[in-house]
Image (cartoon, rainbow, N blue to C red):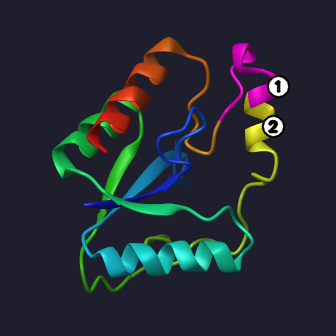
Amino acid sequence: MHVLLFDPGSDQEGIHSLEIGGRTVVLLFEDPDDAERYAGLLEAQDFPVPCVESLDREELEKFCAEAGYEARLVPAGFLPKSEEERLLIAPPERNMDVTTWKEDLAAAPEAGAETPDGAGSDPELEAFRRRLEGLL
């Protein structure tokens, strides 16, 4: 599976996620070209440019479940049937403001500042982040 990561391998690593119906959803792309296209669409919206990383599906699903995220498979050739499903192939027109997420994290890591993946200084979430990094 392929996911979108920001600053992989760094202390500020984050995984791209969406808020859909009050749930935090991490997209698992079956086709790397679909992941690259999605990353390009984010870049076109002046969003920080993510890296496409190939990781084990079972480990990603376990990571998401333990972190309280929903892992959503985007199969190759996926065609959306609803507005919500459209978000699996194209990012929303409006994104959260992430222009200062690195600065926020650096300025107040002890205060639970959040990265784009929602992980802060919670030791349990940090352990999950390290496990995800270990998959790389």
* Residue 86 seen in the figure: no
Give the label on residue 107, or none: 1
Question: Which is nearer the eye, 72 or 46?
Answer: 46
- The residue beneath circle 2 is 103
- Helix or strand or loop: what does disc 1 sit on? helix
Q: In the rendered picture of this protein, how many numbered marks are placed on residues?
A: 2
Q: Are marks 1 and 2 in contact (CB under 8 Å)?
A: yes
Q: Where residue 7 sits: x, y (%)?
A: 56, 48
Q: Is residue 130 above or below residue 35?
A: above
Q: Residue at coordinates 47% horizontally, 41% vertically from top-left?
A: 9
Q: Farthest front residue?
A: 9
Question: Which is nearer the eye, 135 or 30?
Answer: 135
Q: Where residue 36 sits: x, y (%)?
A: 44, 76
Q: Residue at coordinates 32% horizontally, 29% vertically from top-left?
A: 131
Is 107 covered by the magenta stretch?
yes
Dot 1 alpha-carbon crowd within 10 angstroms: few under 14, some 14 to 19, many 20 or more: few
Dot 2 alpha-carbon crowd within 10 angstroms: few under 14, some 14 to 19, many 20 or more: some
Give the label on residue 75, or none: none
Quarter occupied by residue 58: top left
Q: Is residue 80 above or below residue 28?
A: below
Q: What quarter of the picture does the C terminus occupy?
A: top left
- Helix or strand or loop: what does disc 2 sit on? helix
Q: Where residue 120 sits: x, y (%)?
A: 61, 25
Three-letter amino acid code of the residue under disc 1:
Ala
Quarter occupied by residue 121: top right
- Range shown magenta: 106-114
Residue 9 in the figure: left or right of residue 97: left
